[in-house]
Image (spheres, coloured by chain):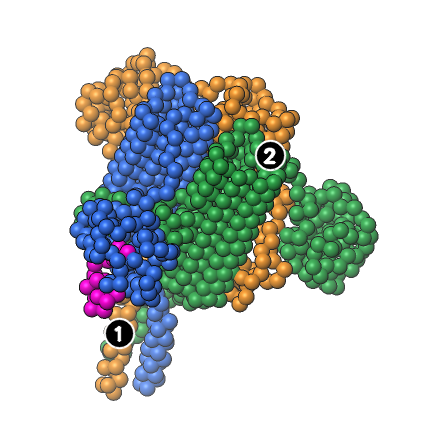
Chain colours: A green, B orange, C blue
Amino acid sequence: MSDLVSRVPDSQIHGDAGHRVDRLVHPAEVRGPHDLCLLMGKGALGLLKAGGGKFSCAVIERQLADAPESGAVLDGLTAYLLVDRPRYALACLSPMFRQRSQPVAGVHPSAVIEDGVVLGEDVSIAAGVWIGEGVKIGDRSVVMANASICEQAEIGEDCLFYPGVYVGHRVQIGKRVIVHANASLGGDGFAFDSAQPNSAEAAREVRAISGGGSQRLERIESLGRLRIEDDVEVGACTAIDRATLGETVIERGTKIDNLVQIGHGNRVGKDVLLCAQVGLAGSSKIGDGAVLAGQVGVVDHRVIGANSVIMAKSGVTKDVPADQVCYGMPARPARDVLREHVWVTRLDRVFKRLAALEARLEDTSDSH
Amino acid sequence: MSDLVSRVPDSQIHGDAGHRVDRLVHPAEVRGPHDLCLLMGKGALGLLKAGGGKFSCAVIERQLADAPESGAVLDGLTAYLLVDRPRYALACLSPMFRQRSQPVAGVHPSAVIEDGVVLGEDVSIAAGVWIGEGVKIGDRSVVMANASICEQAEIGEDCLFYPGVYVGHRVQIGKRVIVHANASLGGDGFAFDSAQPNSAEAAREVRAISGGGSQRLERIESLGRLRIEDDVEVGACTAIDRATLGETVIERGTKIDNLVQIGHGNRVGKDVLLCAQVGLAGSSKIGDGAVLAGQVGVVDHRVIGANSVIMAKSGVTKDVPADQVCYGMPARPARDVLREHVWVTRLDRVFKRLAALEARLEDTSDSH
Amino acid sequence: MSDLVSRVPDSQIHGDAGHRVDRLVHPAEVRGPHDLCLLMGKGALGLLKAGGGKFSCAVIERQLADAPESGAVLDGLTAYLLVDRPRYALACLSPMFRQRSQPVAGVHPSAVIEDGVVLGEDVSIAAGVWIGEGVKIGDRSVVMANASICEQAEIGEDCLFYPGVYVGHRVQIGKRVIVHANASLGGDGFAFDSAQPNSAEAAREVRAISGGGSQRLERIESLGRLRIEDDVEVGACTAIDRATLGETVIERGTKIDNLVQIGHGNRVGKDVLLCAQVGLAGSSKIGDGAVLAGQVGVVDHRVIGANSVIMAKSGVTKDVPADQVCYGMPARPARDVLREHVWVTRLDRVFKRLAALEARLEDTSDSH
């Protein structure tokens, strides 16, 4: 256990510091004395009690240990670690228990490497990968099977690209970037126009135009780039488009979940969380530390301030200041929207009270 | 026709049982006497009438045949099958008319099979497939072109994996599982934490915190598994993540459409239908036989009871009991939400009635 | 500049027509006298003023030039093009500035071409591509790395398929079609039924049935086709399913963004725009020139009229006539829905006015 305590800030070890730990598992999967599990939340002490002698070692949320009934239960453990932030402890400890086999450095014979490619030291290029002309890949980066990386793309050190990932030409990717399976980085933006007004334009002004569909839509080529900074993670089947001119940017440390759409020209700040199925139309700016929960949409040319939180399924149609919590379609301060939701559920009473008033007034009139 | 009748429960054949059938087609595509079509719903009899001699054989919803005007029309057919549930009849009959060429058993020379892989009998591994160390694939399973299957994954018998599918390490897949193109099975969960409170945490409590974005987000490694049971189908570009600890589970017979997101630690029950673009955040339980219609979202740690139906675009934020129909964001009993929708459309009248009451009361006051 | 003016209808050149242009860039990226940028919208003149001598040549929205203060600013440019529709000018000019390397014609040695494949002139088949039996590909079409094209598919001239694209058997694709990375064209439809009523059926009738989940779901095979006409573009990770019987059709000139779901049997008209994450359940008809904004959903068997606009995040549950703008879930005329949104925000006043009326009426009663 002693090697664990040094990994988690402000953690304390109790019991036998020399106790050996083999696996980090879910409490339901503890099989032997060397299976470490994490106990957090209300039910955890009960779990420990019910487990009888099954649990030998654990990582435990500190406030649980402070509970009066916890003493006897904890005494039954051979060793445990008290931590302030159990999920953060998991972030610190989980890398020690990864069970993946290490990718073999080198280029698999079935991979195709075009001219002018520069590969750093200990790069691993798996079976079926295609790497276009002039691509640069930094030291120790891993490109898994059947990924395709187009010409002039630049990828930093210690990146991990899962199978089937697509990287477009001239895309720039920083260090320690993880991209999950079948993501598409640097596709062309969804940008078209026609010689005469078309229904897409009308859409922006919330009106329809007759004959709008008779206009042939011509592609606006995406001449711009996509740039992804260090420590970004991109989910499976997520699509991030390059800019028309200029660049689409994902800044340092931002984490993007599966099936997210990031249209052309967006700039996503640092340490942002974009949850699954979020969609950013285009040319918006997402401030540092913002959180967009699942299935949120953002129309084009919007600014979301730093640290703001957009609740699940909301649609951002106007700029959001910093440090706001917004909700709904259209997204507005969550407090207002939640209050209005309650009002709507009480509309039956409004109708009843109106009817009562009307009846009463009728009586009053009659009585005159 | 006689070989068809045995396939469909409670079906009855009329006319020439020996009539030959070559194709099963849309009514609009009937070209000759051996083209079988399915006639169901209100417009079907009219179609048959209008078709004149074009239709020779058909599968017909029984209640259509019971209509008084149908006798003469049906007499014009050489043979027809009466069925109670026309869509179920289609499920029974359509496998007889598949036009796909049978995949060739064996391993294509361009596929890459790592050490320790165990392939069952008559397995078909297509061009460009990569199969990692220690993978097991059951008899007659088919892996189509450019799929990538990582180390220690286990796949049962009679599975069909379309091109570009990704299967992560140690993922367990049952028998007769179908996975459509470019799906991602067993990616890492979207799980991060920081040493100090961050805006993601604030988001859970519907508040923003200043400086939340200054916290560096650390990955919580996904040490858990993904397990998919028998007879499951997974749509194209769908992403299902492995658990942090423990397992993500998709139980027997569940059908998942395209572009669905299933986050880490969810447990989806038996015979569930997850329609296109549904998103499950994480650690939720979906009961047997539940139906989540298109674009539904479910926040984390929720329970949806057996046989419940969540209508399209709803957002589940609270537990749903069994046998419920829910709707809206947040999802509540559909009846309540639909009634409130009507109330809202009548708000103009509320404002008018209020104004009338106020005016009248003004008069009443004045008259005193 | 003189070669540019001929490309843009109704454009006029001012200054040195012989001025050389090397790049078309974002105004923020102008580095030298031969960098052309596009200036449109309110802020553009200010940008030009602030830029000092940095800007030498530009494409400028005509109405900016008409502003009284613009004369002096424009005089500072060596050459500029005045255009009526700046975005359309971008569509006309951007193809001249593409920086991609031309794909090499021919079949890469690592590609696998099955029997009976017919490739047109100057077709380019990249590394790792698999092409099934009997596929036909028209002149000059390009299939990028690791794409998989199944038996009997037919692809027209001048198409561009990005890496990882999947094309199902017998899918028919027209000329000049662009398909972005990891899209899935022609997967099986999401169609299942059971011998007895199941919860999916109940869902259609907004009711739950007990034991609905005990019914085993049987696949209805997709015997139909997918047909995509000329000049269609399909986004990354988009999934379009084939029909059960008959065909799913995407008509000429329609543009489909990333992560869009098009279920079985839909017919999407000409010059339609389907923005990112749109979902069409099945068997719907989308009229020519319609625009479905981001994250819109359409339930099955609906008709959306020509040139109609469905605003972002709406859910179409009923037919929409032509030339309508609809919004909300369920989608209704946008004007109505937006007005109701305002009413809801004013519900606090309704409660106050009701209370005031009740109090007053109480007084009135008391006074009798």
Q: Is residue A286 visible?
A: yes
Q: Quadrant of the N terminus of chain B?
A: top left
Q: Position of residue B304 (x, y in %)?
A: 51, 48
Residue C200: x and y, percent? Answer: 42, 39
Q: Which of these two is toward me, B10 or B282?
A: B282
The residue depicted at 42 percent of the width and 59 percent of the height is A285
Q: Which residue is mark 1?
A: B355
Q: Are marks 2 and 1 in contact (CB under 8 Å)?
A: no
**Please, what is the three-letter code of the amino acid marked with disc 2?**
Gly
- For badge 1, the amino acid type reads Ala
Identify the magenta region: C57-73
- The chain identifier of the residue carrying mark 2 reads A
Tell me the chain of label 1. B
Q: How many marks?
A: 2
Residue labelled with disc 2: A106
Q: Residues within 10 Å of mark 2 (few under 14, many from 20)?
A: some
Q: Is residue B170 left or right of residue B308?
A: right
Viewer-proximal residue among C25 and B196: C25
Is the residue A280 above or below the residue C268 in the image? below
Q: Is residue A83 magenta?
A: no
Q: How far, Cα to Cα, is label 2 from label 1? A: 79 Å
Q: Nearer the viewer, mark 2 or mark 1?
A: 2
